[in-house]
Image (cartoon, grey):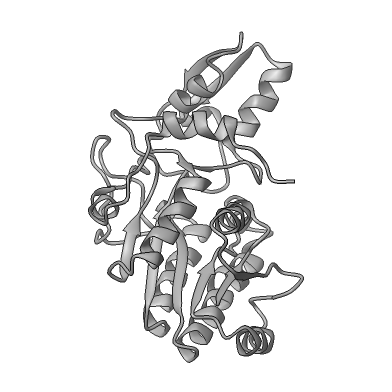
Amino acid sequence: MILITGANGQLGTELRYLLDERDVDYVATDVAQLDITNTEQVNKVFAEVKPTLVYHCAAYTAVDKAEDEGKELDYAINVTGTENIAKAAAAHDATLVYISTDYVFDGQKPVGEEWEVDDVPDPQTEYGRTKRLGEELVEKYAKKFYIIRTAWVFGNYGANFVFTMQKLAESHDRLTVVNDQHGRPTWTRTLAEFMAHLTDNRKDFGYYHLSNDATEDVTWYDFAVEILKDTNVSVKPVDSSQFPAKAKRPLNSTMSLTKAKATGFVIPTWQDALKEFYHQEKPE
C-alpha cells in the first residue's frame, strides 16, 4: 500500500490525481489525519496502513517566515516530522520518497554551471538548513529511499509564481521581476510522474535532481515573460536588491538533470510544461 503525507498540498494533490488516473490505490493523509511531528500518531498510522511505499510530500515551505516567526514550526515539520516518517518507513521496510530543495546549496555557483547531486550542501537559510537535516535523517534511518531535490515549483493546486503573475496582471499593465536569479521551473505534474517513475521501475536508490528542462539559461524574469506573453502587460527586469527578503535567495538554482534523464525519464521543457499546465483539467 502507498501512503502519502501532505496529500492536500500542491504536490500531494497532483500526485493523488496522477495515481487516480492510473487506478493505483493509496492512503492520503494531511495534518488532520496525520500530524507527522507526533511520533505516536505516525507509528499508529503506519501500523494501520502497513505501507510498502511512502511519498513524503508534507513540508514547511514558507521560506521567509522560517527565518523568525515560523522557525520552530519549520524545524518541527521538516526535521522532527521527517525523522518520524523515516524511522517508521524503516520499521515497515517501506521505500521512502523525500522531496527536497535547491536551498540545501549556497546558490553561489557561477551562472551556466549546474548543481550536481553529489555537490556539497551548504544551506544559507533556515528553510534550507531544515530540509538538509531532513535529507540526512532520511539517509540515516530509511533503508530504501529516494531524495528528489527540486526548485521553482508551480502547479494547479496551490499558490505559486504563475498564479501570482496572473493575478498581478489583472491590476497592473507593468510589472518588475528579478533577472539575476537563475534556475528552472518545475511543474508538479512532471515531478509527480518522476516520483512514480523511480518507484515503479525500481531505479537505484539515492539522490536525484528534477526540474523541467531548458535549452538556455532561465531567470524569474524569463519565466514571467513566458507566463504573460499573451497579455498586454509589460515586464521589466530588475535585480534582487529591488525585492529585499528575510531569507537569502539563491542566485543560481539550476540543477543538473543528467542523473534523472539516465533513468529513462523524458523531461519536458518548462515552456511545454507551462502550456500543458494551462490546459490541465482539474478533477471535480
Residue found at the very far front of the displayed protein: 23
Residue 277 drawn at (x, y percent): 55, 35
Residue for point 39% across, 65% down: 200
Residue for point 70% across, 26% down: 167
Relative side of 175 to 152, left or right: right
Q: Is residue 34 above or below residue 240?
A: below
Residue for point 38% across, 68% down: 146
Can residue 128 be seen? Answer: yes
Q: Nearer the viewer, residue 185 or 178?
A: 185
Residue for point 40% across, 52% down: 102
Number of labels in the image equals: 0
The quarter of the image holding the N terminus is bottom right
Q: For residue 142, what is the image quadrant?
A: bottom left
Q: For residue 209, what is the image quadrant?
A: bottom left
Residue 178 drawn at (x, y percent): 48, 27
Relative side of 55 to 121, left or right: right
Residue 116 drawn at (x, y percent): 25, 53
Q: Is residue 29 above or below residue 272?
A: below
Can residue 129 be seen? Answer: no
Residue 45 drawn at (x, y percent): 66, 84
Relative side of 111 to 33, left or right: left
Q: Is residue 78 above or below residue 251?
A: below
Relative side of 183 to 11, left or right: left
Q: Is residue 2 above or below residue 13?
A: below
